[in-house]
Image (cartoon, rainbow, N blue to C red):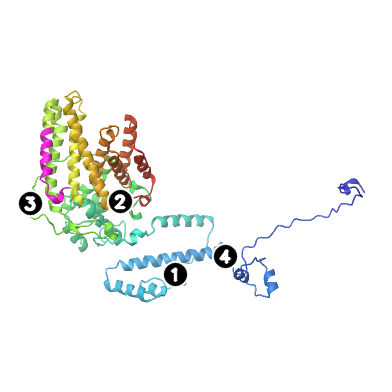
Amino acid sequence: MTSEDHLPALAPGPRGPVNKQPFTLMKPRKNSTACLPCKQAKRKCTGRPAPCKACQNTDAECVFDETLDLRRKVAARRTLGELEYYRGLLYSLLESLRSSDEDKVNHILETIRGSALLSNIANVVDAPADLSDASSDNAKPLGNADDAIAQQERLAADAHSRITLEKLCDIPIFQVSVKPWTAVTDDDHLISHLISLYFTWDHPLSQIIDQRMFLRHMREGNKNTEFCTPFLVNSILAVASTYSDFPEVFAIPGDVASKGAHFFNEAELLWKAEEGRTSLANIQALALMSHVQMSMECRKTANLTPPIFEPPVRDNINDDIVWIPYPRSNHIEYEKKPALLREIMIQTVGFTELVVNMQDLLFDEAFDMNIGDLCRAVSALYTRLETWLKKLPGPLKIDKEAVQVPQVLSLQYHHAIIQLFDSLVNHEDFAPMSLPDVNQARLIRLRSAKQIADYLLLYHEAYGLRHVPGQMLEPANASTLILLTALDNCEYDFKEEFVELCRFLVAFSKRFSLARDMLANIESTAESMGIKLPPEAGTVFDHRNLESSQWL
């Protein structure tokens, strides 16, 4: 026997022979599932084959049920089927509750209150009574990896189109039907939601259409009327989409710039089909589309001309049309207030005449004036603007106790003041003038910027930041740039006002790509001028990357 056949000695004594018989190391076997008795007793199970050791010792009936293992395909298929069934039941319930048939809605509510069985509720909303009924038509075998990837993509798309709590609680002010107005969606609730948003936040300050006339003809569903056409409706929906956070308003999920793009594209197709035909509805629709395309994207200023017709003046400015802050009114009770549409239009006409005069002065007449004549012309126009503001009716003036959208007219006044004196302060021949004149012009501009910030703070406290009229964007940006230059001035403390304006611009950036460019311009301007932004403003700027629901 050779030395290789003996183990080395660990202690004095004779060597022993080596056992060369091969052996394998047994790995512990993992059990995928336990038997039912072991699950109930919460004890360790040795697994298949039945009976396990524990059941042998207790003489229990050892049963393995793989369908209870949530990691297996059978359980995954069952869970997916249950989720799809309850999702379908929820959709059926919502569609039934949105029905205009009051008797049907009352019957559904009575069934929900009086029956604890889900099958009874499913029957009255025309949904499958139980999961077996729903799965019998929809059962599909699990496929390969490609099928699994496709399933994940479908679920991701479904996550974008999910029903949010906000949508469940939403009750639009104006109930209208989607047919026959748009081919983009068949959701009556979505269209009612967008129409309500438009007439709440955008229409009061633009009034391109007659609210009462449009709604009446839209509800009639007649496409041959001159006051409501599919082209006009889709144009309105494109504008209204900028005020909504519903997933359906995004043409591209998560892309703010795509809000309402599908409605806009539909409107473009309808306009091409019109082949340039002139009509009242077509002119109104083109005005709305131009607002979306030019003002919000290209940052172009409209070339205004004086109004041709004077609006009819009425002694009683209290229209019978009321205004409430939808959809905030779904959660907080608000008193209905007069919309003041007629009075807003009358005052807007007078203000537009002054703006036209200002355009003529700054972009035409000023090139042939010396600095002295320009200062006198600016002063005369400033006096006319002040007179217009003083003559505003009480309900249209800024009131700290009762903030309303019509008061945005005052913001437009202050925005005009900023533009008027901006041209003067930035004139190359203005700086060498006497110091009191220069300081007076800058002070007037600064005062208007602060007035805008003060009003926006009141608006924020009253209605939040989710729904702000688009007409506030330019005034907010102009006043932010003015207050930015005053941050380093020890004589003034406008930090709070500046931060509030930044909040509005960040809120606007959730709706308009133009607002994101404005924010970037403010940051670059501050950097180039060596102005350090307040830490609070930096925190607000960080909100640009957050979802609206996380901070608005």
Looking at the image, can residue 73 be seen?
yes
Q: CA distance from mark 3 to mark 2?
A: 34 Å
Left or right side of 522 for 53: right
Report crowding for label 2: few under 14, some 14 to 19, many 20 or more residues within 10 A (C-alpha). Answer: many
**For residue 352, above or below residue 245:** above
Q: Secondary structure at mark 3?
A: loop
State which quadrant residue 119 falls in: bottom left
- Residue that numbered label 3 is attached to: 313
Give me the disc on residue 134. 1
Helix, strand or loop: magenta stretch: helix
Q: Earlier in the sequence, mark 3 or mark 1?
A: 1
Q: Earlier in the sequence, mark 1 or mark 4?
A: 4
Count of numbered circles in the view = 4
Q: Earlier in the sequence, mark 3 or mark 2?
A: 3
Looking at the image, can residue 275 be seen?
no
Give me the disc on residue 466. 2
The x and y percentages for residue 218 are: 21, 60
Residue at coordinates 45% horizontally, 57% vertically from top-left?
Answer: 155
Q: CA distance from mark 1 to mark 2?
A: 39 Å
The x and y percentages for residue 209 are: 17, 53
In magenta, the rendered stretch is 379-397
Amino acid type indicated by mark 4:
Asp
Left or right side of 152 for 484: left
Residue at coordinates 12% horizontally, 33% vertically from top-left?
Answer: 379
Report crowding for label 1: few under 14, some 14 to 19, many 20 or more residues within 10 A (C-alpha). Answer: some
The x and y percentages for residue 206 are: 19, 49
